[in-house]
Image: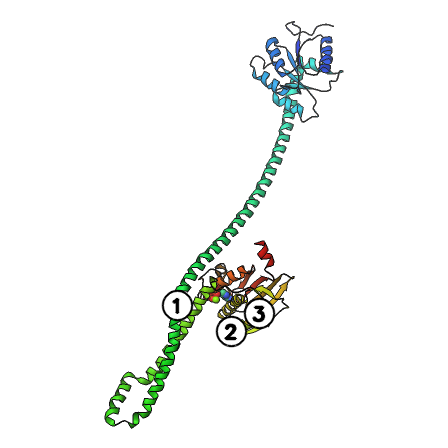
Amino acid sequence: MEGQQLSSGAVVRILYVEDDPANKALVHKLLVNAGYQVLEASDGIEGINMAQAEHPDLILMDMNMPGLDGYEATTRIKAIADLASIPVIAITANAIDGDRERSLVAGCDGYISKPIDVGTFVATVTSYVSGKQEVLEDSAKNGYLKEYNRRLVEKLELKVRELMDMNAQLEKRVEVKIKELESAQDQLLQSEKMASIGQLAAGVAHEINNPVGYINSNIGTLKRYVEDLFRMLSAYEGVEPSLPQQQRDPVVALKKEIDLNFLKEDIAQLVNESIEGVTRVRQIVQDLKDFSHVDEAEWQWANLHRGIDSTLNIVNNELKYKADVVKEYGDLPDVECIASQLNQVFMNMLVNAAHAIESRGTITVRTGKQGDDWVWAKIMDTGNGIPPDKIKRIFEPFFTTKPVGKGTGLGLSLSYSIVQKHHGRIEVESEAGKGTTFTVWLPVTQAEAKAGR
Ligand SMILES: Nc1ncnc2c1ncn2[C@@H]1O[C@H](COP(=O)(O)OP(=O)(O)O)[C@@H](O)[C@H]1O
Ligand SMILES: [Mg+2]
């Protein structure tokens, strides 16, 4: 067969880079038969070296080769200045992974599909050699590049969406974690506050307890003495008319001067007020002691209704002018508790309820159980409610909205620590102007709590 020649008359030399011996043999035969001179290399590196040494007129490049593959080899050849103009034709299986687009991106000037079509192969090579294929290739190249880019963009979009989803999930998880941390910190702060206030309270209670004790007993004695003195005075007054004028006049004058009648009345009032005051101080000291659990009482199985009833009796004075008390008791099992302490919880809630009612209202005490393990007691009032900005603070020690003398702000913090000690919890619902409901939840038995904690 006549040799394939360039316009200069030289024989056209084609470098074929291919690792597969069968393909190599086939192509070699086809090209040689068509009159081309064939140079051969078996991998990318050898291909580059051969190209540099031989400056072939055309390179046929298998894309998938072990070691340095056709893509990388093409890119390197195109980067070498005096090789860049040599057309590199990729021999690729387009079906796989967009090989054709990739080869164009790598710098190939055209492609021939694998497996090689024996009928058209030589004609295609010849058209590349004569440059006819080039025009066609440029627009085709654009099309493929576009398609390649489109797929790339699609993949990127997918990845971006995945990343955004992952990011959103992460953000959510971070949010949840932050909330958990915040509430843990709140609890920690709360219990730390309780602990330090508790110590302080125990100290203060201890210090005040003795002096208040003797003031209380002294005032009691003083009251009796004063009453005795008044009785004595009355006896003297009885004999006053029988005194001779001379002795009676200065006595009458003195009585007038010191305003004895007013004095008698006022002394009684002063003593009574002092007793009231001391009683209040003792109550506060008692509250402080209870708050710090100085007087530890015994755990026992007790009936909550009995406790609530006796508490209602004790606070009846405070409640009766303010509210009608409605009892809606459910069927409750006995509860393992420190009854005296629970009574204090109920007492404080009942008194708070009465305080919240301005003229007249209703206090409802409702009880019930949930399953066999939990009981609850609700103290509901129709009072003025707790504003949302205050509700977070009501369990804080010394938080009170009541005037000095009426509230210590210890009731609910004490209740909180008592219920916590029982491994229960307190819930509050309140609506301004409508009323408030406190729910005390208690486990029936402490066994699990003791074992678990
Ligand atoms: N039933 C209630 N209705 C409205 N406010 C309440 C009620 N119970 C408690 N509070 C609010 O919580 C505060 C704290 O209560 P507490 O700890 O018992 O202290 P104190 O009764 O001495 O003020 C009260 O001052 C009051 O503002
Ligand atoms: Mg109170």
Q: Earlier in the sequence, mark 3 or mark 1?
A: 1
Reading the image, the residue beneath label 1 is: 210
How far across and down, in percent of the image, does residue 125 sit?
69, 14
**N-terminal-most mark, 2 or 3:** 2
Residue topped by disc 3: 365
**Neighbours of disc 3 within 10 Å: few (<14), some (14-19), many (20+):** many
The crowding category of the residue bearing disc 1, from other C-alpha atoms within 10 Å (few below 14, some 14 to 19, many at least 20), is few
Residue 304 can be seen, yes or no: yes
Residue 61: image location, x then y, percent: 66, 16
The CA distance from mark 2 to mark 1 is 26 Å
Mark 2 near mark 1, Cβ–Cβ under 8 Å? no
Residue at image mark 2: 314
The residue at 38%/75% (across/down) is 219
Q: Is residue 350 above or below residue 144?
A: below
Judge from the rendering whether residue 451 lies leftward or rightward of residue 62; answer left or right.
left
Q: Nearer the viewer, residue 258 or 453?
A: 453
Give percent across and percent down for residue 315.
50, 73
Image-based side of 30 in relation to 420, left or right: right
Between circles 2 and 3, the one closer to the viewer is: 2
Badge 2, how many Cα within 10 Å: few under 14, some, many 20+? few
* Quarter of the view holding residue 27: top right
